Amino acid sequence: MSFDISVLDLVPVPSGTAPSQALADTLALAETAEKAGYKRYWISEHHSMPAIASASPEVLLSRVGALTQHIRIGSGGIMLPNHAPMRVAEHFKALEALYPGRVDLGLGRAPGSDARANRAIHARSGEHFVAMLDEMLALSEDSYPVDHPYHGVRVMPEDVGLPPIWILGSSGASAGFAADRGFGYSFASHFSPMAPDAALNEYRRQFQPSAQFQAPHTILGVSVICADTEAQAQHLAQTVDLMWLRLRKGEFAALPSPEEAAAYPYSELERAAVSDNRARHVIGTPEQVADRLSSLAEHTQASELMIVSNIHDQAARLRSYERVAEALSTERLRSPMATRAG
């Protein structure tokens, strides 16, 4: 089968690099992704994490949209309980007005931060997600009845609709909700330990067509590290080994270099955990990566694979994305009868 490829950018902050430089690196990656033929460029939302500088995805998306011409831009995602629903609607209507037909609104219910940061941004519990989403839609569509206190509230620019809505998930709990509402659905296999098959199948099975999505559309997040040789790719992957281990321990230090990771004194248990985690990542040469991604897309029937590459060196990160796109183009040429999904 054929499938689209897209980019998920967490805006990682490599050790030894200023967080502000990570924002500049995002802009360079967006331009590279468009030239390489990626379909979408999504930016995540995280707070109070020294390893990740994507605290304001809507601001970055505005700049990414100005630097690019046709690649779709979106949030992967906006953590709705962190925000007033009206403000999310205003931000994304403005983006849609600036870059018509190019914007996606990916929404999640997780906080994307720790408990202290949650309090600082006055985040609500994820259990309010559905009610907040309904509030955002009702405000955007001016559909509150005349006796409701929000009736007549104008979400500007009011002549622009919200962009397509995607529900982000990592456990499968939101797959049925996304299907019933006729939204797109994205599963975060790049960090979730759960297999995506059940969630994707449930979404496709229950999907109800909507104005934004006439057919189900699934995106599968995948962690990928690609280099010219397998040895180089394995060297670069040491960064995600230590990054993952630190996150598991509640440590949010800057993205370690491969050299820092190699020097880390792993215990025997930590080495075993890191080895198990490697199965979630696609690591190797362009040919190896293309083969594994193609197999993954065929197995899951995902419409699209969204690639995240947390590589310490910016130049190596850009090359990884370029090589993946080139290798998959070659792979598709080997299968001329394949039809595009999604």
Image: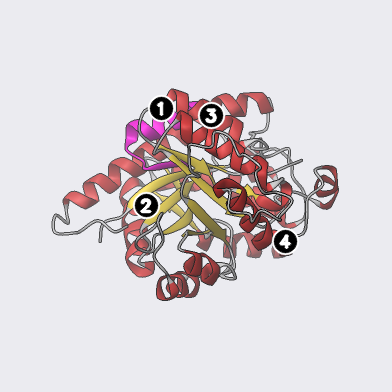
- Taking depth in this image into account, of 44 and 142 the one nearest to the observer is 142
Residue that mark 4 sits on: 128
Is residue 19 placed above or below 192 in the rendered structure?
above
Pick whichever, 22 or 284, lies toward us: 22
Question: Which of the two discs, 2 and 3, sits closer to the camera?
Answer: 3
In-image side of 22 versus 8 (left or right)? right
User: Where is mark 2, residue-wise?
Assistant: 289
Query: What main secondary structure does the magenta stretch of the protein show?
Result: helix
Asked whether the beta carbons under mark 2 and mark 1 sit within 8 Å of each other, the answer is: no
- Label 3 SS: helix
Foreground residue, 299 or 218? 218
Residue type pointed to by label 1: Thr
| Tag 3 residue | 62
Residue type at the position of mark 2: Val
Pinpoint residue 266: horizontal percent, then vertical percent: 71, 54
Mark 4 or mark 3, which has the lower sequence index? 3
Q: Disc 4 versus disc 2: distance between alpha carbons?
A: 39 Å
